[in-house]
Image: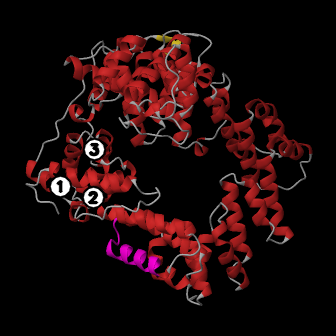
Amino acid sequence: MIAAATPVDLLAAARTEFQQAYGRLGLSPSPTEPPDSQSLRGYVLYPYLQAARLAQALREAGANVPAALDEETAAFIRRHDGQPVTRDLGSSWLAGLAERRQWERLLAFHRRAEDDLALRCHVFTARIETQQTAGLAAEIAQTWLTPRSVPQCEGAFEWLRASGGLDDALVEQRARLALEEGNAGFARQIVRLLPRERAEPLLQWSALLENPKREIDALIASPETAVTTPILLAGWARLARSDRMAAKQRLDALVSARRMDARTASPFVLALALPLAWDRDPDTLGYFARVEDADIDSAAREWYARAALWAGDWKQVARCIAALKDETRRSARWRYWSARAATSEGNDARARTLYESILPDDNYYSAMAAARLSRKATPNAQTLPVDEAQLAKIETMPAFVRARELRLSGLLRDAMTEWRFGQDTLQPNALPQAVHLAAREGWHDQAIATATAARVFNDYALLYPRPYDAPVQSAAKQSGLTTEIIYGVIRQESTYRVDAVSSANARGLMQLQIDTARRTARRFKLPVPSEVVLADPAKNIELGASHLRELLDRFGGQMPIALAGYNAGPNAAQRWIPVAPMDLDVWIENIPYNETRGYVQRILWHSVVFGWLRSGKPQETHEWLTAVKP
């Protein structure tokens, strides 16, 4: 542990030496390679350098790993057992041991494979090869029950079958799991292991998932063909989601052909009503009305309420809200809509009481409630107290020192892993001080993540920083957007991480895909960027703001639609625009993608907070009461 009085700057020399040595990894070794200094050997990140060197040596050795290198790797993992520095090295080394059939050594470290499915399979193989099979059949059978292919476990599964442990019930159970996940092709492979009479309903299920329209038509044409209700419903739900019009055309024919009464037909009607609600189909309420109450769960009931909002049927809105579970009904969302329903019934006193109750919630709905009350929105800030003694103690804990040094060395993924490792060791009363530590270090995304773990949300000065004021103001001036909206997008998209990369390869602070960034650059006559350029805060903000400006222009200056297009794509947002003017709050509530709906609402709230922090004054949200125009 570094003493509390030791200034972090004293690590600068060792940090520089570490970065230089780490940067030489992968390069051809130099005959004049300097030995590691005493300072570097004592540096808190030296184990990361050792791990990287071992990983490189193992890669270079390929299938011909010297025994001495295996021993050195094993000793390193034992020495740092349970610490993040061994995770990547341990996983790759164990996988290499399996490839080299080093079963005994693999089993000596098998505990490290528990959370890795592929490594767990290698351990099964190792136990089979070394005849350590006591209790193994039950463990393999448990792993067998996964809805996806696990190539590394095929040998273990074959052993289970040969030893009589893989019966038809287990095979059918796995096939059903695959079908429930929609993985029909894989289910077909599994079903081959079953006798014909047991396989037929599963193959029928698979066919209904793969070509629901054809199979539904066949079942309508041949009412005598046997099919279980759950299997038919699974295929019907797939058709309703993939081709709403085809499902509408076939519902009554299916009900008639299969001789369903209203009770039996109810789940099938609900399976169609939900995608129609997502499409804001004018017939949606009629279908929901045919569904039995027992079949409508809370999530479906919320969509029933949204469909009623879209149709302007406030009595039905009120009935849907009244039928929600207590916890859901008491949420800010449904208290807000209860207030609007009360207003429609002329009960202004109840509406006012409900709006008043929402104001302390600090979210999109509280800002909307303020607008309905003709008030300005004021965030209810709460300051997270600082305990300097406890903060200093946390700051010097080894995991947090390593996290800080890794971040300063540009190893951000490892830095976040170390931070979480340290965070998990803190007592609940100490966790909030880690929020202060991350914020003081300018590690804003980690401060927000830690605050979420600590259930700290309303210290806005701490959790809504403005670290990019110069480029944000420049982009605002160029695009005509407010700084509050730009910062709102940054906070929601990346939580200030310049290196953020999404699963869709969106990059940087405002999460731009390279094609989008390049099209935007050409339109606004900006330099065409590379993926590397998108990691530059100024360039990313400039292009992100320009792209949002482009969407705002496309959608007639309607910011919520532009934000929806920024998240879900402009074509999706275009499909969601109503054919006639509609209240903005109703339109936002009916955004069919849960992620996009939350995204729009959060950014609107973020803009309120940023505006309040900048001005120190309550924020006007009355403009949110406007209508969305076609």
Task: Assess whether mark 1 and mark 2 are in contact (beta carbons under 8 angstroms).
Answer: yes
Q: Is residue 4 left or right of residue 554?
A: left
User: Which region is colored magenta?
Assistant: 68-84
Please provide percent x and percent y for residue 124: 58, 78
Q: Nearer the viewer, residue 133 or 241?
A: 133
- Which quadrant holds the N terminus? bottom left
Could you classify mark 1 by the number of other residues whose Cα lies within 10 Å: few (under 14), some (14-19), or many (20 or more)?
many
Q: Which residue is mark 3?
A: 451
Residue type at mark 1 is: Ile
Q: Which residue shows up at 81% across the image and 67% down it?
A: 192
- The mark nearer the N terminus, 2 or 1, is 1
In the rendered view, would you say 166 is above or below 131? Answer: above
Of marks 2 and 3, which one's residue comes earlier in the chain? 2
Residue 72 colored in magenta in the image: yes
Q: Nearer the viewer, residue 543 or 482?
A: 543
- Please tell me whether mark 2 sits on a helix, a strand or a loop: helix
